[in-house]
Image: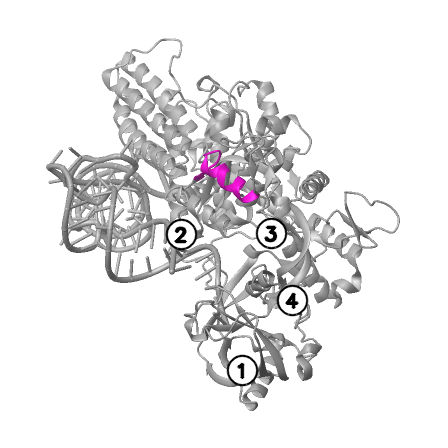
Amino acid sequence: MEEKQQPNIPEIFLSPYEPKEHEDSLYEMWNDSGFFNPDTCVKAGVVDESKDPFSIVLPPPNVTGVLHMGHAAMLAVEDILVRYNRMIGRETLWIPGTDSAALATQSKVEGIIYKKEKKRRHDIGREELLARIDDFVEDSKNTIINQTKKMGSSLDWSRYAFTMDEKRYDAVMEAFIRMYNDGLIYRGARSVNWDPAMQTTVSDDEVEYVETNSPFYYFKYGPFTIGTVRPETKFGDKYVVMHPDDERYKEYEHGQTIEVEWINGPITATIIKDEAADPEMGSGVMTITPWHSTVDFEIAERHGLDREPIIDERGILLPIAGEFAGQHIKKARAAIVEKMTEKGLVEKVDEKNINKVATNSRGGGTIEPQIKEQWFINVNKEFSMGHSEIPGINEGDTMTLKSLMIKAVENEGISILPERFERVYYNWINNLHDWCISRQIWYGHRIPAWFKDGEVTVQKDSPGDGWEQDPDTLDTWFSSGLWTMSTLGWPEQTPDLKKFHPTSVLETGYDILFFWVARMILMSTYLTGQAPFKNVYLHGLVRDQKGKKMSKSLGNIIDPLDMIDKFGTDATRLSLIIGAAPGNDMPLSEDKVRGYKKFANKIWNISRFVLTSIADADWDTAPTYSERDQEILNDLKATVTEVTKNIEEFNLYLAGERAYHYVWHELADKILEESKPIISGDNAEAKLARQYVLRECLVTSLKLLHPFMPFVTETIWQNAPDEIKDQDILMVAKWPVH
RNA sequence: GUCCGGUUAGCUCAGCUGGUAGAGCGCUACAUUGACAUUGUAGAGGUCACAGGUUCAAGUCCUGUAUCGGACACCA
């Protein structure tokens, strides 16, 4: 009886692929190899310094957060790009970091302290609170870092950055001081979004309008009817505004005064004609409250009108409210309406009115516009452009921050993918107001402004005795805006900055296009004359199987760590890539992840078969290929070409699908099946040729799949015989010829 | 109100610069203990939302309609 030859292949292949047994140790091996760091890659000669370097900064997750599917999707996309570019031999850098998330972190710690000790922030003081926050951050930061590693992310940890560390602090100071000296940062009293709950200002983008049922009141205001949802702000209303062309009110003249009976007695009202009043809206007449409304503030600015506060910073009515003074606005409203009803000033109430109430999206309360002395970035001020490497913008051009942000994208110094978001971006810029950057919270970069006897000096360190530093801190997005530069060493002209900036790609969710992407463009173009990145890749939101947003209340959250535990990192990554076109939301289900676990096992078994089949090959003899052999090799090459092209064009979902399809339905289903008789047959020449072909197919497939499924491919590589490898570690092996 | 998307197989979606439709999952039948805690082969299933138009030719370009969704603005 002929004994079936059992070639010597590693025992590991005899049981199914078990991700858990390999992933952690593989990550350690990669990390220890030093190849996450491009400098090591250069020294080892696995990348080529003459090629264009490739760099990505990781959008820093909140330092106190935990990994969710959004992060997982982001890490998968970026790691694929990074691993691919490393394999094609570019010096490749992916910088890790975490974000202090000032407002969120501070309120979290405050909450913990209050729960345990019943103390509020003013009870324990600034220094003590900051020390406690630092401790908390130190304790919790490893969670998100370790979870990031779990995804297989080939980040260069030697360059890890934290938004609040010393280097980033220096960058923030430098940026603030330069912009102040150039007149682009100013201090002024303007209408800002005030959150009475968190006792801080909030930027326009962080305000979320929540639909709420709030009755709409029609009040008698002398001869006019005015409408409002906020009777509690109306005490000081002494200007009545109408459109200059409104025929109904042509008898009234701009500046004319009339006596009207109002909440707390008679007042003198002044007629103001302004185009902001919409004749179509209600009676076409409105009164204004400049202190507590941004639109009203602008009208008051145009006409030089008085403005007075009605409500204090905690939401309490001031003495101007007369008998209602001292009451909280939430309680006062009903009482005010009651009194006005008694006085016969209420004409009508629309109880069903739906209003959008401004709320602090960072977990705070209802926004109360206030006029406050704050720091702003002036987005409309003209300046002369400094050094510029941005296409279409030259040194000496007259620019504003707005025009700079538009031109950087318009002239294709930056391209946004999918393209339709470019319009969304322009739209946002066109509606942009000056950016309020000061916050009244303690955790963050403290504003480098010093006050003494009404004088202001802006510099990093105290000018001397008697100078008091501004207690405010900067909007967290101010420092985030510097992220591409500050992580590379700016303001110092470091070799990293020279080599890796502008970064190649910025990959993030479309929901933070404005918060972050736009602000990086603003900061980088202004401060360095460079775009922060050449490409923006916006991914969608991960949703559940039915397309619903994942949320705790719906109970439909799929935890990436849970998926990794059950099906492995490779399967989790692939499930977040395939079927996810840039900018489109992606549905995810456990079944999908499970499906890709099968694929990982398929690759495992393909490898087992191929390694067994080629174990006795004589690699010293040159092969003579049959026509079919040649065809297989050509198809393989065509697949490589296609996958490569799709990755280059950021169509990772197509690249992944193509590779998946090839490996399963071409290599496994067809090539392997038809090879069985050849390998076990008597024709030595045909067998050797086919062994060469199988080897080529396997090696190439592992390489193609590596960026997508780094763990299973590397595990196979590590257990494959040396003579089929061009590098000891697949992560730095050469991308197949295409 | 302004702007932007979607509407293609039961489900989730892909189809770039126009040449009579694809993937994954699911479904049906058959085969197989094999490299594969399975897999393979075959198959069913689509007037590509609707109506016009351009073209030799239109999911693919243009116009309009319906419908779902998103962003931004306004909201006295």
Q: If you read the primary sequence from the N terminus, does the residue marked by circle 2 or circle 1 appear first?
A: 1
The quarter of the picture where residue A662 lies is top left
Do the residues at discs 1 and 3 belong to one chain? yes
Q: Is residue A697 above or below residue B39?
A: above
Q: Work out how far the residue at label 4 is from the one at label 3, CA to CA, in angstroms.
A: 21 Å
In the rendering, at what x and y percent does residue A266 appear? 62, 84
Percent position (x, y) of residue A209? 51, 63
Residue A447 position (above or below residue A353): above
Question: Mark 2 or mark 4: which is in front?
Answer: 4
Real-space CA distance between mark 1 and mark 3, rounded to the nearest whole angstrom: 38 Å
Question: Can you identify the residue that label 1 sits on?
Answer: A222
Q: Which of the two discs, 2 and 4, labels the residue nearer the N terminus?
A: 4
Residue at the extreme bottom: A342
Q: Circle 3 sits on which residue? A: A435
Closest to the camera, between mark 3 and mark 2, is: 3
Q: How many marks?
A: 4
Of labels 4 and 3, the one closer to you: 3
The residue type indicated by label 2 comes to Ser
- Tell if the residue under mark 2 belongs to the same chain as the one under mark 1: yes
Q: Which residues are magenta?
A: A401-416
Q: Secondary structure at mark 2?
A: loop
User: Secondary structure under badge 4?
Assistant: loop
